[in-house]
Amino acid sequence: MIYINYLSKIRNRIGMTEEELQREIEFNKGRIATKEMPEDVTHPVRATYKQLAIITRLARKLTSTTIQNYDSEYTTFKIPKRKGGYREICAPNAYLKELQQEVLKTFTKELRFLPHNAAHGFTKKRNCKTSLQVHQAVGSRWFLKLDIKDFFPNTTSALLLEAMKHVYPFCLLGVYEKDLIIKVCTREGATPQGAPTSPMLTNMVMVANDVAITKYCKEHHLVYTRYADDILISSKVSFDWETVQQDIQNILKYYELKTEKTRYGSFNGRNWNLGLMYNNKNQITVGHKKKQLVKNMVHNYMTKPECKTYENWYNLIGTIGYCAYIEPEYFKYYLDVVKANKPE
């Protein structure tokens, strides 16, 4: 099967009332559709001359390097996780990072790779809020949160090569180009967490899984979204979450769920998802503590001369700007106050 993802558009407006048209426009806004094409030799997916030129140019760029061992071109360090422990980051050096950014630009901007519609991580105009809005739109009340174990380290070169055969536009590449890109974008046979290409490549590998999980959830009247390794499944009514968890594990095959991080419950509890609260009023919020923190920060900035610095001003603009994106009505006042009081 070949999977082709593209931005959905209204194909036929004839006979639509204005109300129906507006409903279709809203439904298709930013939606990514997936076309599944059987691998029929009589109808192959072929590259255009323009696409061939882009692929050839990228291959030349990647072969111009003098690097012999890509694994040694990374700096490894650990950063603390929000809930304890450490996350290992493998950051490529400047030159290798430039090559990886060229790969990323080629596939996302020129060849226009898009992840599945369920994916909300590392995708333009998609984020934590848009992921929750999918569940909010249907009035979900019960939530199952699943976590894929060691997502980046377990996205291996073998998985990348297999996925490239089935996902457009990677399926346009020849064997040489596929091997070349995998060599440049992996470390010790896996996608390194810290490389600019890793999020795109994991989204590519997950396309077939996202298609299968979406179909499964639709059949069982569930809603599914994914943000990197965080899976969120919801419903208006309570469901057999243990069976769903096992079924999702069966679909994932080459990935393992970290069951100790599984959470299931209704929106009446502390329903935090991707750092945001989905409360029992069907609202997406940053939470009471964050609101109190912002109020205190603004109060200190406005009343204490020693706090009114450029550093604090930029910090406040960033913090309140994010909160205002999540809850514009609540935070607009604070954002306007801080913007109007920039240090002289």
Image (cartoon, rainbow, N blue to C red):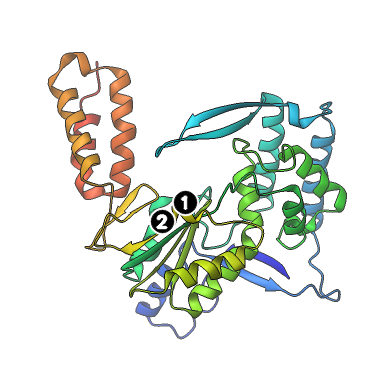
Residue 44 screen position, x and y as percent: 82, 70
Task: Where is residue 297? Give x, y as percent.
Answer: 21, 29
Q: Compared with residue 24, is residue 281 higher up or lower down, i.e. above or below?
A: above
Local packing at callout 1 (Cα closer than 10 Å; few below 14, some 14-19, many 20+) is few
Cβ atoms under marks 1 and 2 closer than 8 Å? yes
User: Real-space Cα distance between discs 1 and 2?
Assistant: 8 Å
Q: Is residue 135 above or below residue 121?
A: below
Task: Give the residue at x 65% y 48%.
Answer: 154
Q: Inspect the image, locate mark 2, and give the three-letter code of the amino acid beneath it.
A: Thr
Residue that carries the numbered disc 2 in the rendered image = 130
Q: Is residue 117 visible?
A: yes
Q: Residues within 10 Å of mark 2 (few under 14, many from 20)?
A: some
Q: Is residue 271 above or below residue 317?
A: below
Q: Going from the N terminus, do you reach mark 1 or mark 2 first?
A: 1
- Residue at image point 50% right, 64% down: 31
Q: Is residue 60 left or right of residue 222?
A: right
Question: 235 or 303: nearer the eye?
Answer: 235
- Picture residue at 53% right of the left edge, 47% below the top: 122
Circle 2 sits in a helix, a strand or a loop, which is it?
helix
Q: Nearer the viewer, mark 1 or mark 2?
A: 2
Q: Identify which residue, 22 or 229, lies in the foreground.
A: 229
* Kind of residue sitting beneath label 1: Lys
269 displayed left or right of 193 = left
Q: Tag 1, which secondary structure?
A: loop
Q: Position of residue 317 (x, y in %)?
A: 30, 31
Q: Residue at x 71, y 48 (%)?
A: 156
Which residue is the site of mark 1? 125
Split into 4 quadrants, where in the image is the N terminus?
A: bottom right
Q: Is residue 206 above or below residue 153?
A: below
